[in-house]
Image: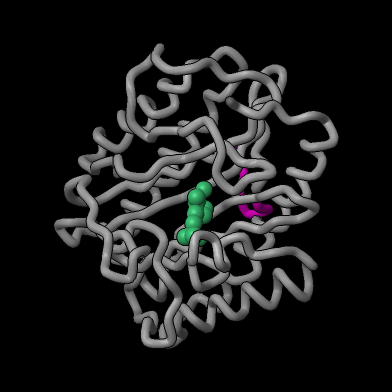
Amino acid sequence: MVDIKSESDIAKMRVAGKLASDVLSMIGPYVKPGVSTEELDQICHDFIVNNQKAIPAPLNYRGFPKSICTSVNHQVCHGIPASTKILKNGDIINIDVTVIKEGFHGDTSKMYFVGEPSILSERLCKVTQECMYKGIEIVKPGLHIGDIGAVIQEHAHNNNFSVVRDYCGHGIGRNFHESPQILHYGIKNTGIRLQEGMTFTIEPMINSGKYKTKLLNDGWTVVTQDHSLSAQWEHTVLVTNNGYEVLTIRHEETGI
Ligand code: MF3
Ligand code: CO
Ligand code: CO
């Protein structure tokens, strides 16, 4: 069952979404060569708990040990922050933040360049962000959910990249992950239709090589099977009466 949010639920989702997006803005200046992903986790944790008076949703979620996910280079998603993982010039990193405020979740992630990116890294991150926006921009009541995946897949393939199939976007609200699943590949005019008041994430993971993934022995970190680079961007989106509202939009984002 897909939960349809009431006006008061939506007001809380806006607050949670804004807090999550503020964390991504706050952490940007700290993403530099020499910093460890554990330090980034600590800074985000303290900001969420002390400043925002909110809860970092990943911490202890199904046993996840940290407050954010940090996925570097060929890591696809769910990377665990570690003191031994020190960022170096040319790395790309996804930081994925989910906060809970007044019982509601906001979930968002973005890519950061550590120092100077390679031409390929820069193109992969840009195309992945475009994939996310292309999925978001078509959201409106009545849309078939398969259309979201179809436009994302089309843009990735046009750029000779592949779409991760093992992980997807999700409904979000009182729960971190709820119905419906939002696949980032698919066929137009298939799947359920969107309704006003639905809230879900669109969070494409795009690989520079093949789509297949592998789970590391830590039980969390997902990597590309062929060790190619992977990028991901994520927003939490509300279906409005005539389109969409991005609940995790940041100031720097324009033209959407
Ligand atoms: N934030 C991730 C998502 O977009 C989920 C992370 S689950 C965790 O759905 F346990 F790894 F934090
Ligand atoms: Co998510
Ligand atoms: Co997320």
Color scheme of the displayed model:
one colour
Quarter-of-image position of residue 33: bottom left
Q: Provide residue 5's location: percent of width, then percent of height.
A: 73, 30
Q: Is residue 141 visible?
A: yes
Q: Is residue 72 magenta?
A: no
Taking the image as shown, residue 83 lies to the left or right of residue 225, namely right
Which sits in the foreground, 45 or 241?
45
Quadrant showing the N terminus: top right
Q: Is residue 255 visible?
A: no
Taking the image as shown, residue 132 lies to the left or right of residue 194, namely left
Which residue is found at the position 64% from the left and 65% from the top?
56
Q: Is residue 255 magenta?
A: yes
135 over 44 or under it: above or below: above
Which residues are drawn in magenta?
250-256
Quarter-of-image position of residue 97: bottom right
Q: Provide residue 126's location: percent of width, then percent of height.
A: 39, 49
Q: Provide residue 187's location: percent of width, then percent of height.
A: 33, 19
Q: Provide residue 116's location: percent of width, then percent of height.
A: 37, 72
Which sits in the foreground, 128 or 148?
148
Q: Residue furthest right?
A: 8
76 over 218 or under it: above or below: above
